[in-house]
């Protein structure tokens, strides 16, 4: 009997009433924990549809705001407090970090391989799709509620709190706009080909993966042309380090001014003695892996067994049409050099044969012949004559750009003269948009320069290096964007005002007050 | 190879040496009572910053495009922003106490740039050909400069009780230090906000979406959130002083990871937004 009486009084003595700060702390942490718990419960037991996630987010925000109307709970002041903002933003930051450490939106096998037995739990909890998960949604929901409550606490705006209202209204607009994007945005691929009939639909994608569903664009789009502009390639002298594991690492691009001695790594040096251009083609044929021997078009080459190879023609960009059984060259650039030869063996009919560079000869012709082509781009092939000096002495070499000629020096370093790859400068599609009335409008779409058509934005996203008639566009219709961007504008105005102007106003006010007190 | 590069690029080397000398002078001014030492340190820092600016300008001319494409180029620009922001702060607060750390920061960026030396000047790919490129990068790097300064102040504030330096009046009373760090973070946070939103608008025009949870994007949001936490908690009792310093330092660790650590993430391989 007596214990029953004593126990409560001890508790009363040992636990003084909570201070305001402690109570606020408790409420803040409880609100964050509750948000996550509700989100996780939804994530675990309900299908992960976008509409549902959005519904839970908005519903949770509304519930928190409703509960904050009950003064006894003290939610309004706690969730509108700096403390709550600090705790909640830190928790959201941790969630975002997890979303970069765990690969997002991959196939279940990827997670099974990476995380083993914990993989199913990670998938079920939405950790593999954090940014679309219900609990990330409830965190954003309670964030929105906190933004509203912090504004309610400070209402109405004053000169000093103006930035606060701008910024927090902007953040709410951004959250609302992203909710609209999350629920309503459509994005899909439009694959176009020059000469193909105009496209009227986009194949919808979800996180970059085609769902197979089609969205009606409401207009037709035809590809009139697609162009890849490239930076002109350049010739340069470069120094590489040969890596022990194979391959080479470029160390520097060197000056190629004539006659001047320059330093190289490993206490070596070089001097460019001549700029040269190798013109005309050189053709080399080797037999059964033997040494290459130079031949001229129209000339002959004696083989080991007495047979003679007559060089009939040179094709810089060789092709063979199987239907007409004729050979030809697709252009003057040496993209696929080949020789047409006649092999005349003693006591046999002469046989026509094609020797293609880097391909084994044969196909009914004479086996064992290899053809090598050196230099001879139509405009000539730039080369440098370079003198390299290191502790092993001085040597001179002719470096032909197309041949990857190099001089080894120092400690596994080489100097080489090379042609830089042609890098893309721009990808641009010229399209015609045809509206329902049949009216055509020419437009241009490039990377960083989308086109806007009837609420859709068209982006240049894909091309096929092997098929210049193809262009891949992405069509995006996102009704959330204007709200999000309006929010950005408010935040960009509000943040500087709030964190820089408002404190200055406060200091000025305090100073004026102190002056007033003194007088 | 490092020795070769330093010999071949004298302007870079002189800039590096100027920052190193500025560091030595600023550090000696902590111990020396002679005001000439500190004044010389400032002049050296100004000279180093001017040389650094020349490096950027020459690179801009040579590349024919803004020199913010590669990690090397961005490190050179970071060194400049760090010293420039510091010199402004030195003027504003009339104190050279943090000069040593600022010079060390710029020096560190340049030393790392040597390790990440560009063997060639790469062309600007289509994705970076945008009017948003320069403002996005410049705003961010000035922010990084300001946040570096805030972190240097926060560091001094944290270790101050264990230090006895002749560092002028600035080190008396921790409130002043706390306020200086706070000032720099307010500036840095404003610029982070602007840089983040510029990036988002750019992403909309380049990728078709204003936010794609790309790892670099996510981490820049984390950076913003950490400093937002700092700014909110300053209004909560008990969160100024050393606790605030700790958040400021953690914030800069996140900045560094966002800037340099992306390749450590499994999600970075698919990103077009990461320095290689």
Image (cartoon, coloured by chain):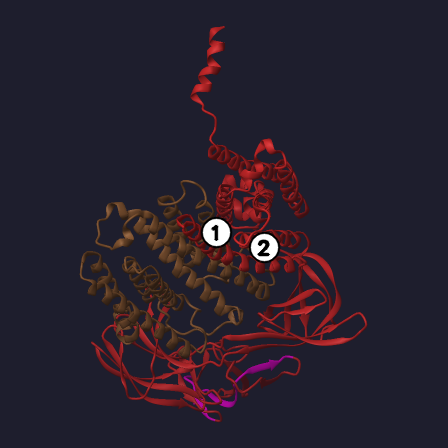
> Quick one: label 1, few (<14), some, or many (20+) residues within 10 Å?
many
- Percent x, y of residue B145: 39, 61
Q: Which residue is mark 1?
A: B222
Q: In this orientation, which residue lies closer to the viewer: A389 or A367? A: A389
Q: In this orientation, which residue lies closer to the viewer: B103 or A494? A: A494
Image hue for chain A: red
Q: Is residue B11 left or right of B270 when viewed as pictured?
A: left
What chain is the brown one? B
**Which residue is farthest right?**
A437
Q: Secondary structure at mark 2?
A: helix
Q: Residue at x 78, y 75 (%)?
A: A439
**Which residue is farthest front?**
A519
Tell me the subunit letter for badge 1.
Answer: B
Q: Is residue A241 left or right of A186 when viewed as pictured?
A: left
Relative height, residue A312 to residue A439 (above, below)? below
Relative height, residue B183 to residue B20 (above, below)? above
Q: How many marks?
A: 2
Which quarter of the image is occupied by the N terminus of chain B? bottom left
Stretch in magenta: A299-322
Q: Which residue is mark 2?
A: A170
Let me know if residue B228 appears in the view. Answer: yes
Q: Secondary structure at mark 1?
A: helix
């Amino acid at each position: 009997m007596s214990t029953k009486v004593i126990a409560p009084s001890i508790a009363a003595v040992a636990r003084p009433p909570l201070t305001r700060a402690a109570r606020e702390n408790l409420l803040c942490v409880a609100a964050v924990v509750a948000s996550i718990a509700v989100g996780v419960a939804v994530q675990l037991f309900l299908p992960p549809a976008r509409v549902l996630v959005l519904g839970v987010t908005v519903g949770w925000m509304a519930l928190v705001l409703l509960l904050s109307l009950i003064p006894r709970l003290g939610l309004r002041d706690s969730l509108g407090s700096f403390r709550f903002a600090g705790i909640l933003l830190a928790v959201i930051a941790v969630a975002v970090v997890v979303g970069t450490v765990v690969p997002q939106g991959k196939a279940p096998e990827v997670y099974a391989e990476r995380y083993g037995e914990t993989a199913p739990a990670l998938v079920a909890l939405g950790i593999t799709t954090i940014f679309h998960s219900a609990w990330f949604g409830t965190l954003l929901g309670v964030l929105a509620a906190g933004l509203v409550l912090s504004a309610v606490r400070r209402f109405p705006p004053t000169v000093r709190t103006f930035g606060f209202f701008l910024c927090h209204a902007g953040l709410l607009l951004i959250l609302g706009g992203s909710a609209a994007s999350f629920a309503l945005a459509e994005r899909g691929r439009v694959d176009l080909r020059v000469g193909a009939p105009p496209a009227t639909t986009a194949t919808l994608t979800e996180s970059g993966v085609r769902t197979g569903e089609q969205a009606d664009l409401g207009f037709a789009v035809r590809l009139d042309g697609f162009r890849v502009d490239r930076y002109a390639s350049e010739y340069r002298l470069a120094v590489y380090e040969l890596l022990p594991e194979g391959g080479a690492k470029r160390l520097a691009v060197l000056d190629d001014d004539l006659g001047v001695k320059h330093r190289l790594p490993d206490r070596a040096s070089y001097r460019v003695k001549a700029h040269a251009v190798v013109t005309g083609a050189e053709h080399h044929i080797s037999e059964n892996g033997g040494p290459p021997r130079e031949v001229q078009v129209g000339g002959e080459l004696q083989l080991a067994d007495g047979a003679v190879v007559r060089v009939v023609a040179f094709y810089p960009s060789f092709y063979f049409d199987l239907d007409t059984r004729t050979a030809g060259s697709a252009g003057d650039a040496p993209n696929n050099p080949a020789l047409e030869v006649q092999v005349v063996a003693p006591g046999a009919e002469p046989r026509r044969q094609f020797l293609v560079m880097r391909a084994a000869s044969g196909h009914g012709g004479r086996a064992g012949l290899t053809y090598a082509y050196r230099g001879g781009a139509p405009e000539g092939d730039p080369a440098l004559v370079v003198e390299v000096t290191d502790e092993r002495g001085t040597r001179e070499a002719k470096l032909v750009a197309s041949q990857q000629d190099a001089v080894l020096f120092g400690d596994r370093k080489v100097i080489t003269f090379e042609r830089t790859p042609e890098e893309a400068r721009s990808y641009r599609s010229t399209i015609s948009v045809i509206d329902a009335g049949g009216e055509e409008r020419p437009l241009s779409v490039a990377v960083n320069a989308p086109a806007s058509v009837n609420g859709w934005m068209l982006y240049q996203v894909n091309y096929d290096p092997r098929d210049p008639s193809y262009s891949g566009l992405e069509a995006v219709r996102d009704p959330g964007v204007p709200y999000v961007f309006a929010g950005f504008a408010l935040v960009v105005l509000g943040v500087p005002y709030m964190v820089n102007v408002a404190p200055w106003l406060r200091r000025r006010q305090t100073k004026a007050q102190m002056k007033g007190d003194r007088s | 190879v490092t020795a070769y590069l330093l010999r071949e690029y004298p302007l870079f080397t002189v800039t590096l040496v100027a920052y190193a000398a500025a560091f030595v002078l600023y550090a000696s001014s902590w111990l020396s009572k002679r005001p000439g030492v500190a004044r010389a340190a400032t002049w050296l820092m100004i000279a180093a910053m001017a040389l650094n600016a020349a490096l950027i300008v020459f690179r801009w001319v040579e590349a024919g495009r803004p020199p913010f494409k590669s990690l090397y180029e961005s490190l050179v620009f970071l060194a400049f922003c760090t010293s420039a922001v510091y010199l402004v702060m030195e003027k504003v607060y009339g104190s050279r106490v943090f000069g040593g750390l600022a010079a060390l920061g710029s020096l560190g960026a340049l030393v790392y740039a040597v390790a990440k030396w560009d063997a060639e000047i790469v062309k600007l790919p289509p994705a970076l050909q945008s009017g948003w490129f320069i403002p996005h990068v410049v705003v961010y790097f000035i922010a990084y400069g300001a946040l570096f300064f805030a972190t240097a102040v926060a560091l001094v504030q944290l270790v101050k009780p264990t230090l006895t330096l002749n560092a002028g009046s600035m080190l008396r009373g921790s409130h002043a230090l706390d306020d200086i760090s706070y000032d720099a973070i307010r500036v840095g946070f404003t610029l982070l906000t602007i840089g983040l939103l510029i990036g988002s608008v750019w992403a909309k025009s380049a990728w078709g979406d204003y936010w794609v949870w790309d790892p670099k994007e996510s981490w820049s949001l984390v950076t913003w959130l950490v400093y937002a936490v700092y700014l909110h908690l300053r209004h909560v009792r008990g969160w100024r002083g050393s606790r605030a310093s700790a958040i400021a330092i953690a914030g800069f660790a996140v900045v560094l990871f966002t800037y340099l650590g992306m390749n450590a993430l499994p999600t970075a391989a698919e990103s077009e937004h990461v320095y290689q």
